[in-house]
Amino acid sequence: MKQACPRNGDFQIADLSKRRCKHRPLLISSLLLVLTVVTASADPIIIGSKKFTESYVLAEIAKRSLENAGIKADHRQGMGGTIILWEALRGGGIDVYPEYTGTIAEEMLKQPGAPTGQIRNALSAQGIDMTDDLGFNNTYALVMRRDQADQLAVKTISDLRAHPELKFGLTHEFLERRDGWRPVSARYRLAPAHVLGIDHALGYSALAKGEIDVKDAYSTDAKIGDYGLVTLIDDLKFFPQYHAVFLYRKTLSPEAAHALNDLSNSIDETRMIRLNSEAERTKNYAMAAQQFFGTTERASPFVSETLRSKLLRWITRHLELASISLLLSIAIGLPLGIVASRGGPVGHAIL
């Protein structure tokens, strides 16, 4: 039968049993601390991405940047649309994901046109932080086949007003967004006879086959060039700026936050289009991210950044190992030292 700890008024038991019970809470606490330290050091940072190529590539770039800093990271590819990723981030299901400032202001915070400082404050109130602009603006656009646009003399979105017979194939997210189809069509006074909901990737093949005539797209999408499409000019300046950033939970370590913020102002639109094109061609998003880190373009600033990342990785790993050793020493050694200092059979056994 399991022996209970002695209580006042109970019969006298061995001094060793008393001491063992007296120090049991301290020992249990120490073991819990050890388990917490070991578990925390093993948990990877979870990076989410939306269901399109650029989001995959940016997530892989974030993963590589974290790994270069000696931080474990996993990429959960194509989790869904904006709302799914945002709720996963707020709820702790993921730690990081790539997003766009226009989407943050319009869709997530419901603060259209909010300046960066206001966006940061609103995110911070929800336990979320944001990197600086990664270096490119991936705004929404409407695209057509170049030959058809030339034939109809359509150069701007306003020109579509004269052609209500054109078939629009729009992504489901664009159809539902606060800065999507409904406000665009109202602003430009467009009333096409056919508006269909279609998957982003399938829309390009449908456009190439002539099944649809107009599609929403991202301005850095490699398929615009691959399919010989033309981007219609946003002549009324409707679409807001969609600067790419990383959103991350404020609970991330300073080293992880630094690794993400190191990517700020490192990717211009031309480079992002090339990375997207490589990813579309090979379907290897990690390889596209590797090209970003291995490229010789803009060598002077980027090579120094790579060297700094390597140095940071070595230092971080050294500090991590030293910290774990120190915490384990404290967690185990301190309670044992206290017990030993009080003498008795247990203390002598420890010594």
Image (cartoon, grey):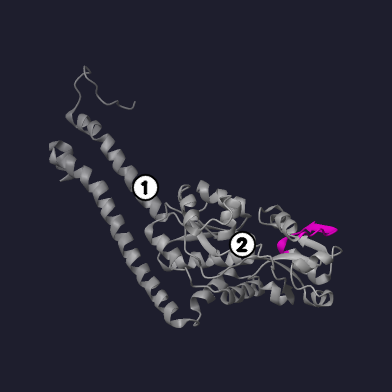
Residue to which mark 1 is pinned? 36
Q: How many marks?
A: 2
**Element on which disc 2 rests:** loop
Q: Is residue 232 left or right of residue 93?
A: right
Going 38% across and 61% down the picture, which residue do you hit? 255
The residue stretch that appears in magenta: 189-201
x, y (%) of residue 230?
73, 74
Q: Does residue 139 sit above or below 176 in this rendering?
A: below
Mark drawn on residue 240: 2
Amino acid under disc 2: Pro
Separation of marks 1 and 2 at Cα, in angstroms: 45 Å
Residue toward you, 197 or 158: 158
The picture places residue 276, in percent across and down from the top left corner, at 62, 72
**Residue type pointed to by label 1:** Thr
Disc 1 + disc 2, Cβ < 8 Å: no
Count residues near mark 1 (Cα–Cα under 10 Å), then give few for <14, some for 14-19, many for 20+.
Answer: few
**Residue at horizontal 60 percent and vertical 76 percent from the top:** 274
Tag shown at residue 179: none
